[in-house]
Amino acid sequence: MRLDPVVGAAIADAYMAAPTRDERAYPAYAAFCRETVQQYHFLIGRAEFGGLGISVHIVDVDPYPNVAAMVDDVRQRRLMVWASAASGNAHPYLSDGENDMFRAVHDVFGHAASGRGFDRHGEEAAWWKHSSMYSSLAGRALATETRGQNCARIFRYDPGRFPEQKAVLLPPAFSDPRLVRLTGSAATSAAAP
């Protein structure tokens, strides 16, 4: 799976043009938050009761140089997550704790599950993989949290800077995983509406 740079730039522009928050997005964020907490409890739940038994530790620095190091930790039933509070980039809807839970589940169910890293192609694959675990309503918020933020970071920000977090919904052409066309080993997305 690969992200076409023209599509990525269009997603980045849509994210950048959006306000910080839009109350019309709140039902999607409420569903996203509920479903993320459920996924988190499955992630950390004891294996003998059907959970994955992964021990999550919140740390103040970026813990992994690459996805292989993170996958190795997950195989050993542990995961380090870079603390949302350490970024100085508060989310307009999610608490720091909810944001940390999301980062944990996305790292495991997006990146580790797809085996893909943190470049534009890996982020696209992780969004697409993880989207199957969310309802269509919550998936709209997931697309903003992953696809929107990452495209803004990759295509519109200097390396190392992270865009302002937002509670908005991207256009369906950018947030609906069913609109990603898989062709061979590559994927492209629908153009802007």
Image: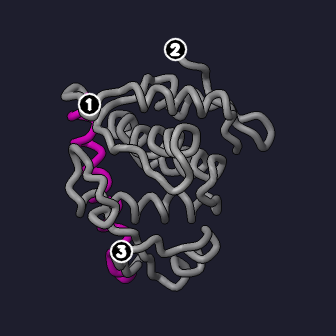
What percent of the width, then of the height, locates residue 57? Answer: 35, 79
Name which residue type carries label 2. Pro
Residue 111 seen from this side = yes
Image quadrant where one finds the N terminus: top right
Position of 102 with respect to 156 (left or right) is left
Q: Which residue is mark 1?
A: 25
Q: In terms of secondary structure, where does tag 1 sit?
A: helix
What percent of the width, then of the height, locates residue 20? Answer: 28, 34
Q: Which residue is mark 3?
A: 60
Q: In terms of secondary structure, where does tag 3 sit?
A: loop
Quarter of the image for residue 43 reads: bottom left
Which portion, as a residue range, is magenta? 25-49
Up-down relation of residue 65 to residue 161 (above or below): below
The label nearer to you, 3 versus 2, is 3
Mark 3, Cα crowd under 10 Å, few <14 / some 14-19 / many 20+, is: few
Q: Between disc 1 and disc 2, whose residue precedes?
A: 1
Query: How was this image coloured?
Result: one colour
**Residue at image coords 34%, 80%:** 46
Q: Which residue is mark 2?
A: 193
| Label 1 to label 2: alpha-carbon separation | 19 Å
What percent of the width, then of the height, locates residue 98? Answer: 25, 58
> Do the CB atoms of the residues marked 1 and 2 lie less than 8 Å apart?
no
